Amino acid sequence: MRASLLLFSGIPLALAVSTSHSNSNEGYASVCAHIASDISSGSVYYPGSTQYEEMTHRYALSAGENSTCAVGPKTSWDVGRILRVVGSTRTPFAVQSGGHAQHRGFSSTRGVHISLRNFRSIVYNSTAKIVTIGTGLVWDEVYEALDPHGVSVAGGRVAGVGVGGLTLGGGNVTALELVKPNGEVVQVTEEGQPDLFFALRGGLNNFGIVTAITLKVFPQGPVWGGAIVYSDPAYFSKVAAATSRFTSQVTDPKANLLRGYSFSNGLVVQTAIILYDAPSPPPGVFDDFLKIPSIQNTITTQSFLSFFTKSSAGVPDVVPGIYVCSANFLQYLYYLLQASFKSSRLSFGTGITSKSKSLTFLGFTPEPFLSTILSHNTTPSAYPFTRSTAYCPMALSVGWADPADEAFFSGALKQITRSIEAALVAEGHGDVTAAPLYPNYAFGDTPVSRIYGSNLARMTEIKGRVDPKDVMGLTGGFKL
Ligand SMILES: Cc1cc2nc3c(=O)[nH]c(=O)nc-3n(C[C@H](O)[C@H](O)[C@H](O)COP(=O)(O)OP(=O)(O)OC[C@H]3O[C@@H](n4cnc5c(N)ncnc54)[C@H](O)[C@@H]3O)c2cc1C
Ligand SMILES: *[C@@H]1O[C@H](CO)[C@@H](O)[C@H](O)[C@H]1NC(C)=O
Ligand SMILES: *[C@@H]1O[C@H](CO)[C@@H](O)[C@H](O)[C@H]1NC(C)=O
Ligand SMILES: *[C@@H]1O[C@H](CO)[C@@H](O)[C@H](O)[C@H]1NC(C)=O
């Protein structure tokens, strides 16, 4: 049994992909043909072809739609040509990088599916200590390419997540290549295009399509880390106490903890994914976790690439249904979770139990960051709209096997999230509900004010200038 499996999977893969499609629309088909004749690189593919299947492949089938065609441009200029065609014909479209969005329409459409999979270049400049990477890559590929150089970048934590969505949902970049909604290709830096630089860091697909990003690299030596899985409820309070001590006392930026509370494979477990960015940790940092009896402990000294690969082992390539919700927390939330997340009572009295319909997975994954996390980067960005308090994001996710159960589980997950927020407000932490929600974890129908808050006015003004015809309104996601 692997921890990552428990965190992210437990979903039977037997129910996998259906390959026939029938929703093709005459009007969209002629737009697809128009695009095919307009672009000079890449091709347009139709349902039934291998290329179409590959280009529309996504993590959560529940977030998918059957597009009329899929197009895989190879240059930014061709991305611009496609945007001009879909814009002028008002054709719905999707932009897909890694395809890990968990809400329908975010990177899926019934119209034209634009796959960025051909944007795969990785150019490392060791003098400038930067790397420029295409948005068709997933983080696994980036870490693998940088590993031989002894450097890494701040990217995703789990295999398969795309460079595009994660970065535009709040990543730390130094430059971006943007195809504007009018088809123009521009380099966006803080100095050259401060408004777009602000808007793209968190603004997802509202301002155009990004084809490459530049990130700072940092030296990356061997790390000490792995996963510990606790399954005996008798020890859960000790795990909570260790977590609470870690969040209140450890200020060493090399120490990282990801906690998981999950139900998967018929088991309720708690996990601690632990990483110390050096070959061994100083005494005291993680000792409490190591002392508690566990059913699995994979902690060892290894390369970061190896740590990443092992932590992702068992994460499925595709799941039938999954939703994620987001809540903000500070350390006191652990007590709340601890009190509520018991084997017999999975979900705050919302009616989900381990026997509910086709439930495959239920998990809460709080990421306790240092309170200094937001102090490293002071350049304003769309997300987060305030840096005054470092709230930590917590992903709440639910997985199911039977498509008919989608509405039940989406409703239940939203209710769990509301219950957590209500409990926090009752405890006097009303500010938690006003804190920025992390766009990459927020539920699909979250009002954009909860995500962008006081930045909304500036983002809307920039959007009006860069996209006066609202071309990006033809694609799904959190729309301004
Ligand atoms: C198994 C799993 C593990 C995860 N782990 C992490 C994690 O470790 N850390 C974390 O922060 N998040 C994590 N997430 C959440 C993840 O960051 C978001 O789902 C993210 O948006 C996925 O990016 P993507 O490129 O794979 O998705 P996609 O579905 O391809 O894109 C997501 C959104 O971004 C838009 N978009 C993507 N690329 C571009 C582009 N180049 N230009 C314009 N718009 C674009 C899409 O249109 C879509 O609306 C995880 C999700 C899953 C399912
Ligand atoms: C896509 O098409 C398949 C086969 O026709 C169908 O089973 C599936 O429900 C469709 N998906 C959507 C989201 O319409
Ligand atoms: C790498 O960066 C250095 C310093 O900024 C610059 O002088 C050099 O031209 C870059 N190399 C390449 C190949 O772009
Ligand atoms: C994040 O951005 C800031 C400001 O641009 C920079 O100083 C810092 O090094 C960046 N961090 C990473 C990991 O790229």
Image (cartoon, grey):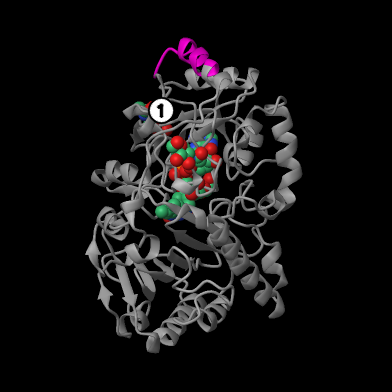
Quarter of the image with the C terminus is top right
Give the amino acid type for the residue marked by disc 1 in the picture: Pro
Taking the spot 37% from the left edge, 48% from the top edge, the residue there is 318
Quarter of the image with the N terminus is bottom left
Q: Secondary structure at mark 1?
A: loop
Bounds of the magenta segment: 30-42
Q: Which of the two residues, 25 or 312, is positioned nearer the viewer here?
A: 25
On whether residue 35 falls in the magenta region, the answer is: yes
Q: Position of residue 371 (x, y in %)?
A: 56, 67
Indicate whether 141 appears above or below 114: below
Q: Position of residue 62 (x, y in %)?
A: 48, 48
Q: Position of residue 450 (x, y in %)?
A: 69, 55
Q: Is residue 362 left or right of residue 472?
A: left
Q: Can residue 223 be seen here?
A: yes
User: For mark 1, what is the residue?
Assistant: 47
Taking the spot 39% from the left edge, 60% from the top edge, the residue there is 8
- Magenta stretch: dominant SS? helix
On whether residue 161 falls in the magenta region, the answer is: no
In which image quadrant can residue 128 be found?
Answer: top left
